[in-house]
Amino acid sequence: MSDLDMSILEKKKLDMLDAYIDTFEDKQLNIITILHYAQSVFEYLPKELQLHIARKIDMPAVKINGIVSFYSFFSEKQVTKYIVDVCRGTACFVKGSQNLYDIFSERLKVNEEGISEDGLFTLNSIRCLGACGLGPVVKINDKIFSHVTNDMVDDIIVEYREKEKADES
Ligand code: FES
C-alpha cells in the first residue's frame, strides 16, 4: 500500500483483499467478484479502496468507479446501522429543526459525509415527512420522534447507543 489513507483502509483488511486478488490469474476479468469481496470486507467501496484495487489489478480507476456506480449492490458510501433524518421542511424549520440538526451533528461528531465518529449513525436533513403537525420531527430508521426539543437529543442518542450495547451482549 503506498500513499493510501491508513485511517480508512485498515492494513489487515487490505492484506486479506490483496491475498484474495492474487488468487486470480486474470484479475481484470474477475473485477466484479473482487469488488464483491472487497465490499464484504470493508462494508463499502470508498474511492481510496477503488484506487488501491485499480493499481493492484492494473485497471484505470475511472473504469472501476464506473462499475461501482453502475451496479446498485455496490456502495461508495458507508452504510450505518441507524439513519437519522432531521426534517427541515418549512413547518419543522420554523419550529427549530435547524438547531436540532446542529445539536445532532455536534453530539454525534459527524464527518463531512454525515457519518458519526462511532460509525453507528448517518445524519441527514430531509424535506417534509408529511407529519408537519408533529414537528419538529426526527426519524431514525422507521421510528418517528415528534415535537423534538433540543433537550431530547441526548436522550435519543443514548437510547440507540444502549440498544446497540444490548444487541452486542
Ligand atoms: S415540514 Fe417536517 S414533517 Fe412536514
Image (cartoon, rainbow, N blue to C red):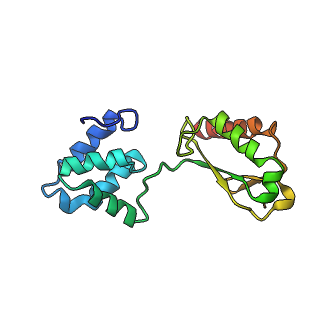
Question: Residue 158 occupies which quadrant of the picture?
Answer: top right
Residue 134 placement (x, y as % from top left): 85, 56
**Quadrant placement of the C terminus:** top right
Tell me the residue at 19%/59% (across/down).
28
Tell me the residue at 19%/62% (across/down).
29
Q: Nearer the viewer, residue 67 or 40?
A: 67
In the rendered structure, the answer to whether residue 97 lies left or right of residue 163 reads right
Q: Is residue 150 above or below residue 34?
A: above
Q: Is residue 129 above or below residue 157?
A: below
Residue 143 placement (x, y as % from top left): 73, 54
Question: Residue 60 occupies which quadrant of the picture?
Answer: bottom left
Q: In which of the image's four quarters is ligand 1 placed? A: bottom right
Residue 152 placement (x, y as % from top left): 80, 39
Question: Residue 10 occupies which quadrant of the picture?
Answer: top left
**Quadrant placement of the N terminus:** top left
Tell me the residue at 66%/34% (across/down).
106
Q: Is residue 99 above or below residue 67?
A: above
Tell me the residue at 69%/57% (across/down).
142
Can residue 136 be seen from the camera position used here?
no
